[in-house]
Image (cartoon, coloured by chain):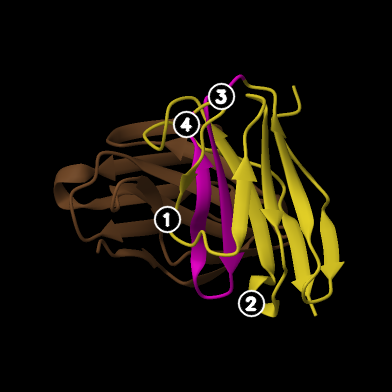
Chain colours: A brown, B yellow
Amino acid sequence: GIQVEQSPPDLILQEGANSTLRCNFSDSVNNLQWFHQNPWGQLINLFYIPSGTKQNGRLSATTVATERYSLLYISSSQTTDSGVYFCAVTVMNTGFQKLVFGTGTRLLVSP
Amino acid sequence: NAGVTQTPKFRVLKTGQSMTLLCAQDMNHEYMYWYRQDPGMGLRLIHYSVGEGTTAKGEVPDGYNVSRLKKQNFLLGLESAAPSQTSVYFCASSYGGLTYEQYFGPGTRLTVT
């Protein structure tokens, strides 16, 4: 099956710093989503980005489907950015679609 | 607009007991999903529904049943809980399947002793 790997696995930042998270996938996909799981466990959809670039405030994402990777940029990080960031791709399983989540990047932003 | 809500937030069951988890969404989404999240295994799809009155099995359906009597609600039932069902359960919804944005509920932390 498809492999979805994220790097780095862990990241510690000082508040105000910028960072880039990477998601590599082993096969062609039709879509890709980025999620943030906050320290309370809530999963929040950040971007639906099968290709191209999107921006939302301090966050932006770029997917280059032909090269099988996506990047999530966090600028001017804040303590509320802490948590785990997942990318997820949709694949077809036996008779149904499913989301395959990446391995996650755990981010800690310290004040 | 509450989005996706789940009840309860926490529950402790003894082996063999039953319970129902409720998911509700107010976005008029057709598709709804139940996932479980276990350490080191990511999220796995339990059951899903493509519309009112429909349900289908996902990756790990054994030990669970679901119902979608109303479009806005998706219920997950455990008839006879087992310790292997200790997990965090997430409900999600989307407008038109997994090629659309997924919106997740806050999760239910279930412990089976």
Q: Residues within 10 Å of mark 4 (few under 14, many from 20)?
A: many
Q: In this view, does B93 lie to the left or right of B86?
A: left
Going by the numbered disc 1, the residue's amino acid type is Thr
Question: Disc 1 sits on a residue from what chain?
Answer: A
Q: Nearer the viewer, mark 1 or mark 4?
A: 4
Expressed as whole percent of the image width and height from the top left, the position of residue A24 reads 28, 59
The residue at 42%/33% (across/down) is: B97
Q: Do the residues labelled 2 and 1 touch (CB within 8 Å)?
A: no
Q: How crowded is mark 2: few (under 14 residues within 10 Å), some or many (20 or more)?
A: few
Q: Earlier in the sequence, mark 3 or mark 4?
A: 3
Mark linked to residue B50: 4
The residue at 83%/59% (across/down) is: B10
Q: Do the residues labelled 3 and 1 touch (CB within 8 Å)?
A: no
Question: Which residue is label 2 attached to?
Answer: B84
**Magenta span:** B28-50
Q: How far apart are marks 2 and 4 (CA)?
A: 27 Å
Question: Disc 2 sits on a residue from what chain?
Answer: B
Question: Which residue is label 1 attached to?
Answer: A20
